[in-house]
Image (cartoon, helix red, strand yellow):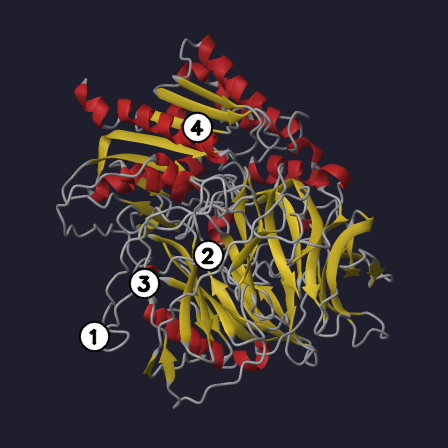
Amino acid sequence: MAVVHRHVPAVLGQVQGDVAAQATGRSGDEDGRAHGRGEGVATPRNQKIEAPIIPGRHRPKREWGRGRPSPRPPVRGQVRLGVNAELRRPQNPSPQSGYLPWLLSKPGGWRHHADAPPFGRPRARTTQVPPRKHMNIKLTKRAIALLGMSAVLGATPLTGAWAQTQAVLPDVTTNVPFQPLPVKAYVDYPLYQQGSLSPDGKKLAALAPVGEKRNIVVLDLDTMKPRVVTNFTEYDVVQFNWVGDYLVFSLGTLDTPTGPDFGEGGGLFVVKADGSGGRQLHPTVREAGRQIRVAGRLPNNTEEIIVSGSLRDARAPDLYRLNLSNGKKELLTFKQPGLVTRWLVDESGVPRVATVVDDRELMPEEQQVSVLYRDSADAEWRVIKKFDKGEKERWTPIAMADNNQDFIVSTAKGRDTSALVRFDVAKGDLSDVVAAHPRYDMGLDSMGDLGASLVRDSDGKLVGLSIRDEKLQTVFFNERYAALHAGLERAFPGKAVILQRTKSDRSLVTVVSDRQPATYYLFDEKTRRLKELLRTNESLNERHLAEVRPFLLKTRDGLEIPSYYVLPNSYQPGQKLPTVVHIHGGPFARADTWLGGTGIREAQVLASRGYAVVIPNFRVTPGFGKKIFEAGKKGAYGRQMSEDHEDAAQWAVQQGFADASRMCISGASYGGYASLWAMIKSKPMFKCAVAGLVVSDLQTQLTSMSGDTAYNRQGQRSWKEEILGIKGDDWTKAHEVSPARHGDKFEGALFMYAGRDDIRTPLQQTTMMVDALKRAGKAPEVLMIKDKEGHGYGKLENRVDLYEQMLAFLDKHIGPGSQKK
């Protein structure tokens, strides 16, 4: 279980303006815009707080927190925001429906009201949509126990999900026939993503499908009028941040096998909430190569932000103050103290901590690393810690502390998983542990990503941590936040509740689970009213989505790796189900979590058709500590990693729900490679494979100029030496586990798919495998290649086609169709 110690408020309660500008230019705070308000006044422990009641539900008859309110009546209809999209409302709407009141339908008529054209698109004629009143439900008063600061994170102890490896089978309570929804309902884009309130609480911004890409839509919460403010047609808006009335954002692809990817997008753009003032602050990767990233905000400054970028020297990023209205940059780090890989700035925007390496061309463990510190903008830099080459137990600065002197670091000293710990500058040493978990990295994982996302208020002050463990939980250091969040969690039992407070009395409450797509609510702290704003999906609910169940995968050599499995809602104990083992992409990515990912999406599609799906993590998956990650290096690729996939399949059979004679393996990117290799190495365990965006020849993947891997010298070296265990020019180890070099040994049915424009695993990798199989007289049964698609299918019609053909393929080989032979 993760523990947050009692001293945490003194360490992090008022942290401001930290910047962790890595060599990649990415901010060390990935969730900097996600949560709430800065003036968090602590609530006395004896004060009662009114409990939120969900609009559209009957009031609970039993004591709040002990009785589940009656479910909301189902709502029909569909909403899609787009420049020319039709806005619809449910049939026979009622005030209790909870449906957004400004959604109206008129054939060929209603469009989004806008005084300015969307950024990236010429002005279009628009028609104002008249607002309608929304029914509010008054809250009842209930006492809320404050979250103890030394408490375990969350309500589910580790003695539950991860402490056992036995499958928990669903209870069947109904015999009502189930009719699955069309595939489109499961693979369609969410109507809204990344909902975020403006600092003044008057507007809600979110990503929504506009044409074939996700763009920013802004809803005025007083008039309930929507406005499309961007309209990019080649890239998705991947992430955005509110800065005053500005929206600052970058481009890329939201749907890849490992999650959002900037790819050839990137860049930095700004637009005002009314759609005016749109400008490019920095060009995209395709246009300029070197990038800048949002690195922090300045207190009480709505015109400027801090950005990081390696614009002067490709080896080291600088920090700049960037003016959003005119795009001018002011260099903050003119006197660099060396090859800086990471900066921290204080609450005034002054760089105070710098992490410096001696040679950027070396592998991280070969570098000498120094941490430098200065007392003020005019003071000289001084070394406060030096790590020699090969030194294992290093630490990395993450955030400035509340006293504007100490800082928080990520360290795995004496531990397997990384923790967040305070560094006391006066003492020159590590002091108090802030957050730690025995199975999950709370600090930086082995790929340099924060395990516990930093939760900040609208002024950039750190108020809590968001933790992706077996599910999702948030811990707050501010007692006011903690009390409000605890009350909301009780109102939505079994759901994850994400809280974003603002400078106003309005807060955004996002409620989501494995079986409920996210719903956004507006909570008024003054009137104590909670109002539903948006549902991200109107089609899917608990009847159509299956539970995502955690289990602990025990490998044959003793590793214990957190993983997931999904069973159909109709599953009856004793049934032997056709089963698919889905292998995530990366492989250096935790691509699937309780709330989603490519594997989870695929699992929901298949579970709706009666399949069981196992979604194992495996050695080299980051986020679970050093031991699991390091076990995937030095030649484990295609060997021990593939054995982990076999162990996951055997676990499913041992649990009794998987039919050993009807198993298939699937995946994309690395998962595509693993699926191909399983039909050679693991035969006859799997009857068929679905392999997408594949790597089929490792030497060609690392050296061919048709992809982007060969252009990254350090990445290429890491792959070759650290992962594959290759020394010099002897590629034998790679050839031994390259599927395209063993086509004659392939056994079983094969479905392959690729994107013609993929540069991560280029089409060359697919054609090499197809050619090898044809030479052996074992051509793929299905070969799907989509034009104008890259590393993942972005077009909805292509996603639908992929899963419909996949279902037909599986039905033939392990599903009901295979039983008719």
First of labels 4, 3 by sequence position: 3
Q: Nearer the viewer, mark 4 or mark 1?
A: 1
Residues packed near mark 3 inside 10 Å, few (<14), some (14 to 19) or many (20 plus): some
Secondary structure under tag 1 reads: loop
Q: Can the viewer see residue 644 in this picture?
A: no
- Taking the spot 38% from the left edge, 24% from the top edge, the residue there is 679
Secondary structure under tag 4 reads: strand
Q: CA distance from mark 2 to mark 4?
A: 44 Å
Give the residue pinned by disc 1: 61
Secondary structure under tag 2 reads: loop
Residue 564: % across, % down: 35, 48
First of labels 3, 1 by sequence position: 1
- Look at the numbered discs 2 and 1 and tell me whether their residues touch, using CB distance below 8 Å: no
Residue 263: % across, % down: 63, 39
Q: CA distance from mark 4 to mark 3?
A: 46 Å
Q: Quadrant of residue 619?
A: top left
Say which quadrant the C terminus sits in: top left
Give the residue pinned by disc 2: 102
Give the residue pinned by disc 3: 96
Q: CA distance from mark 3 to mark 2?
A: 15 Å
808 displayed left or right of 720: left
Residue 475: % across, % down: 46, 71
Q: Quadrant of residue 30?
A: bottom right
Q: Quadrant of residue 777?
A: top left
Residues packed near mark 1 inside 10 Å, few (<14), some (14 to 19) or many (20 plus): few
94 displayed left or right of 337: left
499 displayed left or right of 722: left
Q: CA distance from mark 2 to mark 1?
A: 32 Å
Indicate the amino acid at tag 2: Trp
Q: Nearer the viewer, mark 3 or mark 1?
A: 3
Q: CA distance from mark 3 to mark 1?
A: 18 Å
Q: Nearer the viewer, mark 4 or mark 3?
A: 3
